[in-house]
Amino acid sequence: MTDFTIPGLSLDEAEREIASHIFDRGSEKGIVNRVARVRAALDLLGNPHHELRVIHVTGTNGKTSTSRMTESILRATGLKTGLFTSPHLTTFRERIQINGEPLAQEAMLRLWHDVAPVIHTIDMESARVAGPRMSFFEVLTVFGLVAYADANVDVAVIEVGIGGERDATNVVTGAVAVLTPIAADHGDIIPGGLPGIAREKSGIIKVGSAVVSANQRDEVATIIKEAASARGASTFWEGAHNSIEARRVVPGGQVLTLRTGATTYPDVFVPLHGDFQAQNALTALSACELLLGDGVPRSIDGDVVARGFHTASSPGRLEVVPGNPVVIMDSAHNPHGIAALAGALPDAFSGDRLVGVVAVLSDKDADGILVGLEPLLDYVVITRTESARATPTNELAVSARIIFGPDRVFEAASVATALDLANRLAVAESAVEGGVLVAGSVTLIGEAHRYLRNRLAAGGAASEPISA
């Protein structure tokens, strides 16, 4: 095992070593019970997660934005917060945040000394029965829960990885369980179609907890109700208990009037685009009320709510980068997410020409994604990310030409060249107000972020026409 106390090893070098150790593990195939190994590791570490007060968040789309807004509101109340989300865009420490900041490198290094030997022990025990090593997400879950206990946070907002019941994060006992909209996704991993997915995600509901659910399809809502009833959990529904009373689009976001179980909050500015972010904001606010009221909605001071939403961000979720052309990045990676993007796009872009940059992972519904994007785009540039799971460019382009027609489809070997080409296509005529939409994969958003950041570091605009 690597010794990270070697004299002369910088924090950046240590972070790269730790990240390599974690992510070289890869992920597991299929839906397996990841809870057992995580629980065994935490037991060896003294079960620090037992001391945490938790809001547990699952769903198909919107769970990261909802988690981030929930954490931001709670932090605005004066609580010390932890936030566990995925994936990350630049550093894995983004997944483990304390008081709105990625886990500090010094804390990362100090805590890794405690966690690494335990992970090694669990790996060896698993190997003795021909089992796999802990997956990267299992390791990150252990690492995050240890970090929150070490920081003595008042509340941790924990986003599920995949599913719910058998997810690594389901070692926690959530005082509040949050279910964002549930749709068909990960069908190759979670069996049973939409009902199977709903049952898996409802598995985060704990005995005696409070449940907040966004609007769901009838068959999904029925399963959530059954799970909550079986565990004596009280459920608060969008529509019946919480609602968006008014919404208007303004520069930089939207202004909402939100009715919750406790009160109505008028004219709340949310610096995020799209009606789906309004729904996420409502869900987040309701979750905060329930946590603060110990399962009963408790109103929050309006100034605190305003401050919490004002400081909320959701990188890669209808994220707008001003320039010529404007770049819009959205991590929608399934048909449900693309539909939400389509509905929200007019809030962020009203130009004349929109060019897409699209990459899709091989386990996703590529045709469903492309069909959803086709009405939005004038042209599409097909590419692939550096992920080992990325669909090859030529393979994805075949589908794109069938859906878009051959004259609207271009190919690029990398995300950087795809963005360069899309920039040129978007503003090919000077009178055209153009935009570039980056969507289809979370890994694509991460690489696009790095590209734009490097452009700025080199002295260029984040988004500007590039000469051929």
Image (cartoon, helix red, strand yellow):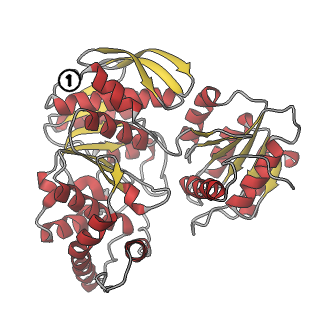
Name the spot of residue 205 as percent of width and height, x first: 23, 42
Q: Find residue 29 and report its image quarter.
A: bottom left
Foreground residue among 76 and 418: 76
Q: Residue at x 13, y 62 (%)?
A: 47
Question: Is there any visible trace of residue 190 in the rendered image?
Answer: yes
What is the x, y in percent for residue 282? 37, 26
Residue with the mark numbered 1:
297
The quadrant holding residue 198 is top left
Q: Quadrant of the C terminus?
A: bottom right
Q: Mark 1 Cα within 10 Å, few/some/many (few <14, many 20+)?
A: many
Task: Please name the residue shown 40% across and 56% down the image.
Answer: 94
Image quadrant occupied by the N terminus = bottom left
Residue found 48% across the figure and 52% down from its top: 187
Residue 51 is situated, as x and y percent measured from the top left of the image, at 11, 52
For residue 455, what is the image quadrant? bottom right
Image side of residue 387 versus residue 99, left or right: right
Q: Is residue 157 above or below residue 126?
A: above
Relative horizontal placement of residue 411, taking residue 283 as reference (left or right):
right
Instruction: Describe residue 453's horizontal placement relative to residue 350 as left or right.
Output: left
Image coordinates of residue 184 in percent, x first then y, are: 49, 43
Is 4 or 319 nearer to us in this picture? 4
Amino acid residing under circle 1: Pro
Q: Residue at x 67, y 55 (%)?
A: 459
Q: Give the tally of numbered discs.
A: 1
Can the viewer see residue 217? no
Q: Is residue 350 above or below residue 75?
A: above
Helix, strand or loop status at disc 1? loop
